[in-house]
């Protein structure tokens, strides 16, 4: 995964969330729950680390905006 930069969290209300889950379905379900509560830049895929269980998904949140804006 790419590094989180200062721009991702430059202002109050901006956040980066990394989800660790057993499978893709679970990771994307969590992303959908987040999207229902705030504006997000959603991830379109998960990543797997060789030799480690599960998947990871990272999305950016903007708590200052309503979902879908």
Image: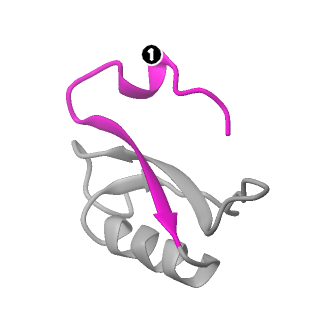
Residue 59 magenta-drawn? no
Taking the view exactly as shown, the residue that stands out farthest to the right is: 50
In this picture, which residue range is highlighted in magenta? 1-21
Taking the view exactly as shown, the residue that stands out farthest to the bottom is: 25
Q: Position of residue 5 (x, y in %)?
A: 52, 20
Q: Position of residue 28 (x, y in %)?
A: 53, 74
Q: Residue, x 67% and y 32% (percent of image)?
A: 2
Residue 8 magenta-drawn? yes
Q: How many marks?
A: 1
Q: Residue, x 58% and y 58% (percent of image)?
A: 56
Query: What residue did someone put label 1 on?
Result: 6
Q: What element carries label 1?
A: helix
Q: Is residue 56 above or below residue 4?
A: below
Q: Position of residue 37 (x, y in %)?
A: 24, 66
Q: Position of residue 42 (x, y in %)?
A: 54, 58
In the displayed structure image, the side of residue 66 where residue 29 appears, left or right: right
- Colour scheme of the rendered structure: one colour
């Amino acid at each position: 995964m790419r590094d989180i930069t200062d721009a991702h969290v430059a202002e109050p209300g901006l956040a980066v969330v990394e989800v660790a889950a057993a499978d893709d379905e679970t990771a994307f379900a969590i992303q959908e729950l987040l999207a229902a509560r705030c504006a997000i830049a959603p991830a379109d895929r998960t990543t797997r680390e060789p030799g480690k269980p599960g998947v990871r998904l990272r999305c950016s949140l903007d708590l200052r905006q309503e979902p879908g804006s």
